[in-house]
Image (cartoon, rainbow, N blue to C red):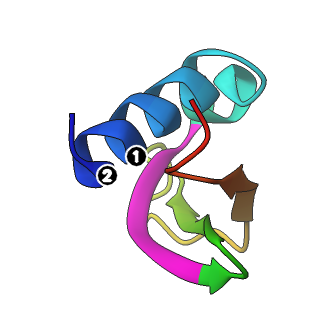
Amino acid sequence: MNDEDKSVIFLQDQMDGGFSGLMDRYIIKDLEWMEVGSGAHAVATLADPSSEGMECNITCLFPPFYPNNE
C-alpha cells in the first residue's frame, strides 16, 4: 500500500472517529497537507451546507499522519 492510500484510510478513520460530529454537520470545502517533520497534518476548510453561501469559518486540523509508522 502506498503513502497516498494510507493517507486516505487515515483521514477516513479520523472523520469517522473523533471528528464525526463536525463531519456530520459540515462538508469539506478544501483540504491541504502541511508537512511536519517526517509526517504531515491535513488541514480542512469546512463549509455549512445549510447556509446559502456555504460560508463557515471553521478550519479542521487533523492529527499528524506518519506514513512510515505501521
Q: Amino acid at mark 2?
A: Asp
Question: Outermost residue toward the top?
Answer: 17
| Residue 39 is inside the magenta segment | no
Q: Is residue 35 above or below residue 8?
A: below
Q: Which residue is mark 2?
A: 3
- Residue at image position (40%, 46%) is 7
Q: Amino acid at mark 1?
A: Ser
Q: Is residue 70 above or below residue 49?
A: above
The percent position of residue 6, horizontal first and vertical second, equals 36, 38
Residue 24's disc number: none
Q: Marks 1/2: CA distance? A: 6 Å
Residue 7's disc number: 1
Contact? badges 1 and 2 (CB < 8 Å): yes
The percent position of residue 2, horizontal first and vertical second, equals 22, 45
Front residue of 50 and 47: 47
Q: Quadrant of residue 34?
A: bottom right
The quarter of the image holding the N terminus is: top left
Task: Tell me how many marks there are.
Answer: 2
Q: Residues within 10 Å of mark 2 (few under 14, many from 20)?
A: few
The percent position of residue 18, horizontal first and vertical second, equals 78, 23
Q: Secondary structure at mark 1?
A: helix
Q: Secondary structure at mark 2?
A: helix
> Is residue 53 visible from the viewing direction of this image?
no
Report the span colored magenta. Answer: 26-34
Q: In screen coordinates, is 13 left or right of 53?
A: right
- Residue at image position (68%, 16%) is 17
